[in-house]
Amino acid sequence: MSNSTENSTSGAASITKKSTSSSLQNDLLLHLNTHNELNTWSYANEHNIDHQLVIGTFRSIQSMGDIIRMEQKTSRSIAPTDEGKILIVNGSYEYNLFQAVPVDKGIEQPELMVSVNFT
């Protein structure tokens, strides 16, 4: 296993920082030791880590030999946009416009446009 280090020198003192990649390798291997399986996307989100860093770290571990077996799975998720969330709560623009028209007498367009708030 290769540890990358960053050295910074100030006068005669030398400071060495441990690579986060090495620390992440240890964390991932410890997780696999107790759970036998890991979803990289979920792990990255749970630990607030960039998903590509997790993938890269796994590929680095995989390149060392027969330590882990990786299987790629693809998933898609669909979520509403901010505007979509507003429409879910308040209804569509057309629905709100239709609801603003009085059933018994109708309404003039300028008055209708003032009465409907689309914010």
Image (cartoon, grey):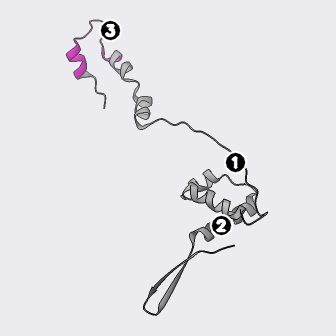
Residue matched to label 3: 103
Marks 3,1: beta carbons within 8 A = no
User: Seen in the image, is 20 located left or right of residue 13?
Assistant: right
In x, y percent, where is residue 19? 57, 73
Residue found 29% across the figure and 11% down from its top = 102
Residue matched to label 1: 72
Tag 2: amino acid: Gln
55 in magenta: no
- Report helix, strand or loop for mark 3: loop
Residue sitting nearer the eye, 8 or 39: 8
Can you tell which of label 1 and label 2 is closer to the viewer?
1
Query: What is the CA distance from the residue labelled 1 to the residue labelled 2?
Result: 19 Å
- Report helix, strand or loop for mark 1: loop
Q: Dot 2, how many residues are within 10 Å of its Cα: few (below 14), some (14-19), or many (20+)?
A: some
102, above or below 87, in the image? above
In x, y percent, where is residue 29? 70, 65
Residue sitting nearer the eye, 102 or 21: 21
- Report helix, strand or loop for mark 2: helix
Q: Please provide the residue range marked out in magenta.
A: 99-114
Q: Dot 3, how many residues are within 10 Å of its Cα: few (below 14), some (14-19), or many (20+)?
A: few
Tag 1: amino acid: Gln
Residue found 57% across the figure and 38% down from its top = 77
First in sequence, mark 1 or 2: give its number: 2
* Residue placed furthest toward the top: 104
Q: Dot 1, how many residues are within 10 Å of its Cα: few (below 14), some (14-19), or many (20+)?
A: few
103 in magenta: yes
